[in-house]
Structures are given as structure tokens and as C-alpha cells.
Image (cartoon, rainbow, N blue to C red):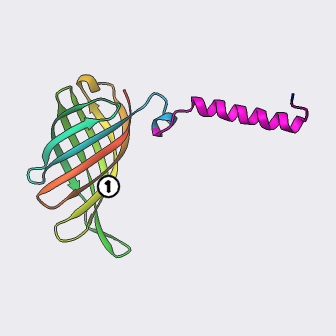
Amino acid sequence: MFRTPLLRRVLGLLTASLALGAITISGADATTAGKLRVVITESGTVYPLGGTFVLTEPAGNDSGTSTIQVNIGPGLFRDGQRYEIHRGEDSLNGKKGGLTLAFSGASVNAGTNLYIEDGTWHVTAASGVYKGWKGSGRWAGTDNGQKYHFQWEGLITP
């Protein structure tokens, strides 16, 4: 039916591309075999530093209380903007188990009593249904000197 070798090659490549596209899963999880995306939303008070969290995404669903221990580094300057490095641990105690996340990131002043923060995290301890979890990701948040809101997102291996 197809008389020219070039046409046969083009149709072969097209067929292979369509077959590959049919078995490819879209989204970030497609490139991370064996890992699950986790999203943890957390809100609370700055003094004392703690609150509540909700864990969602394919990794599961849970909620509970959180306690944060943080060390704030000295004020530094980047291109004239003052920032501080925050390092610490966030202990999440849910109905299904507990997670401890070590984190590090920058905090910058975005106005009167408004701070924007972001950085990286990784799992340092896990219990209950989370036992054996390994993983890491990024976090971002805000605080106004009274209340904070953080979102932890990343990939875990159950």
C-alpha cells in the first residue's frame, strides 16, 4: 500500500508517537515512579508557634495538630533587601500517625508585619501509617506576626 520508504518511515514514527502518547500519564507524578505527591496545608499562631494541618493528595488524607521549632538566623541582605534564614522542625500529629519535617528557607519582609517565606523540607521521622515514609519538597508561607499559613508540597516514597 505504501510505496515509498520515506512515507513508511514517517507513518512508522507517527504510529510509535501515538502509541507512546497513549501510555504516557500526564502530570508531575508520571516521572516519579513509586513516589506520591503530598500537600500539607498548615495554619496557626506565631506565639506559641503551632496550629493545625490537613494532609491531602494521593499520599492520603489526614488532619491534626502541629508544633514548630524554628531557629532564625541573623538579618542578611540580597540586592538591598533584608532577609533571614529560618531552619527548624515541624512536628505534625494526625489521626493516622505523625510526621516530622526538617525545613530551611528564607523569610523576607513584604510590608508592615507581613513576611513571605519559602524553602525546602524533608521527612526526618514518621510513625503510624506514615512509618517508612521518605521524601522531600518545597514549602511557602506567610505570617503577619500573629498568625501563619504554610503549604508543604513534595514527593514521598511510602
- Residue 72 is situated, as x and y percent measured from the top left of the image, at 22, 58
Element under disc 1: strand
Q: Is residue 6 above or below residue 144?
A: above
Above or below — where is 81 with respect to 40?
Answer: below
Residue 129 on image: x %, y % = 26, 23
Magenta span: chief secondary structure = helix
Label 1 amino acid? Asp
Q: Nearer the viewer, residue 18 or 105?
A: 18
Q: Is residue 109 left or right of residue 119?
A: left
Q: Position of residue 13 (x, y in %)?
A: 75, 35
The residue beneath circle 1 is: 118
Who's the residue at 13% across and 46% down the image? Answer: 50
Query: Camera-side residue: 87 or 108?
Result: 108
Outermost bottom residue? 80
The one of 143 and 84 positioned closer to us in this rendering: 143
Which residue is rendered at x = 43% and y = 31% of the image? Answer: 35
Which contiguous range is marked in magenta? 2-28
Is residue 134 positioned above or below 82 on the image?
above
Residue placed furthest toward the left: 48
Residue 105 in the magenta stretch? The answer is no
Figure quadrant of residue 3: top right
Specify whether residue 14 is painted magenta. yes
Q: In the rendered image, which quarter contains the N terminus?
A: top right
In the drawing, does residue 115 fall left or right of residue 118?
left
User: Residue at the spot x=24%, y=26% of the render?
Assistant: 127
Residue 52 spot, x, y in % from top left: 15, 41
As drawn, 41 above or below 95: below
Mark 1 closeness class: few <14, some 14–19, many ≥20 residues within 10 Å: many
Q: Quarter-wise, where is residue 9 in the image?
A: top right
Asked whether, in this view, residue 147 is left or right of residue 76, the answer is left
Q: Quadrant of the C terminus?
A: top left
